[in-house]
């Protein structure tokens, strides 16, 4: 039997390619790396699909794609970063002071009126009930 080359899709969205052979219930994939091969073994449960392709397609499939990006200058200079950190630290400090001051004011002054659950006002006077409707007496 001649060599078979394939792309192998695996569960987990991974794909590999190379020379394939069934060996002891496992799929052996010899992945080309230049003039040599890296051998990988996969169980049948790990394989999503196998597509038979030519050696040329298989070798092209596994060639690494190298993307290089060049930056002319850093996105933020160290001085800009440190200046912004100092600004934010001052802002946080001011907010913490304001928060502490508001807590102090709320605890020293009873800022909320007493609940009206008994139908009496804050000084004990009776609060008349008026729902806005005009009722006639039946007497």
Image (tube, helix red, strand yellow):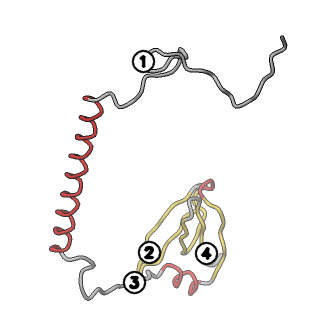
Quarter occupied by the N terminus: bottom right
Q: Residue furthest right?
A: 138
Q: Which residue is mark 1?
A: 123
With 91 as the anchor, is 26 left or right in this view?
A: right
Going from the N terminus, do you reach mark 2 or mark 1 first?
A: 2
Circle 3 — which element?
Answer: loop
Q: Are discs 1 and 3 less than 8 Å apart at CB?
A: no
Closer to the camera: disc 1 or disc 4? 1
Alpha-carbon distance for marks 2 and 1? 92 Å
With 74 as the anchor, is 21 left or right in this view?
A: right
* Residue nearest the viewer, comparing 79 with 61: 79
Q: Quadrant of residue 137?
A: top right
Q: What is the crowding at mark 2: few (fewer than 14 residues within 10 Å), some, or many (at least 20)?
A: few
Q: Quadrant of residue 65?
A: bottom left
Q: Residue 37's mark?
A: 2
Q: Position of residue 86 (x, y in %)?
A: 16, 63
Q: Quadrant of residue 123?
A: top left
Quarter occupied by the C terminus: top right
Q: Position of residue 54 (x, y in %)?
A: 62, 84
Q: Position of residue 75 (x, y in %)?
A: 27, 79
For the point 20% across and 64% down, which residue is it? 87
For the point 53% across and 14% down, which residue is it? 118
Q: Are discs 2 and 3 less than 8 Å apart at CB?
A: no
Going from the N terminus, do you reach mark 4 or mark 2 first?
A: 4
Q: Which residue is mark 3?
A: 67
User: Looking at the image, is 37 positioned above or below residue 73?
Assistant: above
Q: Residue 6's mark?
A: 4
User: Looking at the image, is 48 positioned above or below residue 4?
Assistant: above
User: Looking at the image, is 41 positioned above or below residue 126?
Assistant: below
Alpha-carbon distance for marks 2 and 3? 24 Å
Circle 1 — which element?
Answer: loop
């Amino acid at each position: 039997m001649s060599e078979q080359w394939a792309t192998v899709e695996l569960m987990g969205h991974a794909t590999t390619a190379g020379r394939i052979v069934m060996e002891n219930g496992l799929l052996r994939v010899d992945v080309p790396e230049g003039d040599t091969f890296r051998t990988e073994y996969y169980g049948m449960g790990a394989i999503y699909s196998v597509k038979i392709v030519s050696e040329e397609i298989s070798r092209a499939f596994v060639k690494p794609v190298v993307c290089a990006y060049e930056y002319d200058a850093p996105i933020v200079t160290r001085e800009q970063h440190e200046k912004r950190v100092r600004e934010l630290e001052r802002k946080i400090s001011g907010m913490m002071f304001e928060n502490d001051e508001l807590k102090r004011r709320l605890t020293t002054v009873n800022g909320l009126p007493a609940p009206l659950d008994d139908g009496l006002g804050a000084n004990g006077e009776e609060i008349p009930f008026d729902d806005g409707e005009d009722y006639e007496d039946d007497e």
